[in-house]
Amino acid sequence: MSTWPLSTAVPAPSRPVTVSVPATSANLGPGFDCLGLALELRNEVTVEAGEGTLAYDSPQTTRYTVEVSGVDAGKVPADGRNLLLQAADALFRRVGRRPAAAAVRMVNRVPVGSGLGSSSAAIVAGLLAANEVAAAGMTQGELLRLAVEMEGHPDNVAPAMLGGLVLGVLPDAAHGPAELILRRLAPPPLAVVIVLPDFPLLTADARAVLPPTVSRADAIFNASRVALLLHALTSGEPDCLRVAMADRLHQPYRLPLIPGATVAYDAAYEAGALGVALSGAGPSLLAFVEDDGAAVGQAMADAFAAAGLASRTWQLRPAAAGARLAHGG
């Protein structure tokens, strides 16, 4: 893209803006494309604009330097394919101005292509940083709407921005609402175990296996489980999570794509998990636990190992806070 050439020269330093954005887990079983939870695993991005501001449509290009470190850093593009830069560009386009130069430093902790919202974290970080750099003054609601436009659904970007457990309802011209509805709920007082097998699964491929229509029975099944899931996660009564996190819309089609995932799913329950689900579209699995989750994590890792896959494990807490902004210097 012509607006994102990279420069080997570091731009003149300015007041740096640092953004911290949490990982997220979408769906949580039955809440397909509408429910997500923020997790305490954070990417940090610092953007330092150089001297000068350009009109967005100026023929002069913005000079960027991009430095990526941390988890899966080699998988994060340092050019115009970078979603953070694309999100920043979307905001600059809205407000009609952009910096003449900027240095971007990304410290990555959310694994890429994992089902833990790395794309949404990049979008949210890019929008928040660009809002500050351009002195745009966009509200959180405006930034969220722009994030949802980019991502297509709110289940990851909304908890990344707001923290906690978030339910999102997209606008619908025929039946309403006219505007995006988001409801943030306090995160559950449970620990979360994430096990990520070393298996590439593109979101596009995970969506391609889904049937174009669902039966009435499956729709009723999921509707009842979503209602029960919200109760279980917000009432302090997690005993019904196993029932509440059952799903018929996406997991039966996606789990078989990942070697060992169906066995790992069952093994987590056998090891004492309260509730288990694919995290987003996968390939990672999420389990809610009341203890440190070591046994549950090991059971899932062993199942993936038996299928020939190495895996990585995280023991996390839900994040009450969403994206955080700080000025450095």
Image: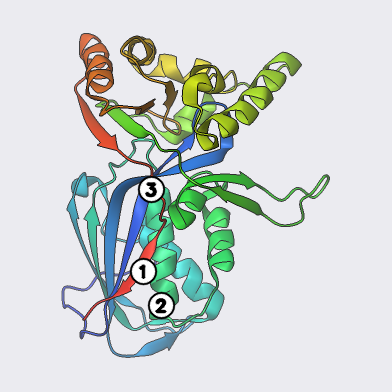
Identify the residue at image location x=57%, y=27%. Answer: 30
Marks 2 and 3: in contact by CB < 8 Å?
Answer: no
Question: Which label was assigned to residue 222?
Answer: none
* Secondary structure beneath label 2: helix
Quadrant for residue 221, please give it: top right
Residue located at (41% from left, 77% from top): 132
Q: Please give the label number shown on residue 325.
A: 1
Which quarter shows the C terminus?
A: bottom left
User: Which label sits on residue 132?
Assistant: 2
Q: Position of residue 109 (x, y in %)?
A: 24, 48
Cβ–Cβ below 8 Å for labels 1 and 3? Answer: no
Colour mapping used in the image: rainbow
Q: Residue at x 20, y 45 (%)?
A: 71
Q: Nearer the viewer, residue 35 or 202?
A: 35
Is the C-beta separation of discs 1 and 2 under 8 Å? yes
The residue where tag 3 is placed is 319
> Which amino acid is tagged 1?
Leu
Q: Residues within 10 Å of mark 3 (few under 14, many from 20)?
A: many
Q: How far apart in space, not on screen, are marks 1 and 3 (Cα)?
A: 15 Å
Type of amino acid at the residue the image marks with label 3: Ala
Q: CA distance from mark 3 to mark 2?
A: 23 Å
Q: Is residue 223 above or below residue 7?
A: above
The residue tagged with tag 3: helix, strand or loop? loop
Q: Relative to 278, does residue 22 appear above or below in the rendering?
A: below
Which tag, 1 or 3, sits closer to the chain's start? 3
The amino acid type of the residue labelled 2 equals Glu
The answer to whether residue 219 is left or right of residue 320 is right
Lower sequence index among marks 3 and 2: 2
